[in-house]
Amino acid sequence: QVQLVESGGGLVQAGGSLRLSCAASGRTVSSYAMGWFRQAPGKERDFVAAINRSGGVTHYGDSVKGRFTISRDNAKNTVYLQMNSLKPDDTAVYYCAARLASSDTYYWIEARQYTYWGQGTQVTVSS
């Protein structure tokens, strides 16, 4: 079991930046591939970014590519999502997710592929 707690959300103006954190406890996060997803009201949970166990491989959804950066600090059991050039369309609840990975090769981009989820943190971007 791993518990995930997101933080860092808030209200920001368009063009601004936020950094989300996902703190893991219960198991060492270095064994898990991690992902960020978001869900706006009335919409499905969408993929944002994923990172493999070591942090050497990342993947992004098309809508955030070039603006968001996922990273991890396994020594701190924490995964980050740096969000720059924020747009009103980025407004959503952001969720951190984890899945035990047998190899550093793996990461996943579909929500159904992840085992553990945090409670989410709200990001609101005003125009």
Image (cartoon, grey):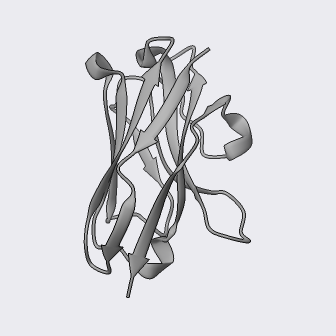
Which is more toward the observer, 31 or 119?
119
Residue 84 higher or lower than 30, as above or below:
below
Say if 110 sits above or below 4 in the image: below
Residue 109 left/right relative to 5: right
Residue under the image location 39 percent in, 63 percent down: 65
> Where residue 16 sits in the image (x, y, percent)?
25, 72
Q: Residue 97 placed where, x, y %?
A: 56, 36
Q: Residue at x 29, y 59 (%)?
A: 18
Locate residue 118, reporting x and y percent. Answer: 57, 37
* Viewport quadrant of the N terminus: top right
15 vs 65, left or right, is left
Seen at 56% across and 51% down, the residue is 37
Residue at the spot x=27%, y=78% of the render?
A: 15
- The C terminus lies in quadrant: bottom left
* Relative depth, front residue between 55 and 4: 4
Number of numbered discs: 0
Of the pair 121 and 44, the residue shown nearer to us: 121
- Furthest residue toward front: 11
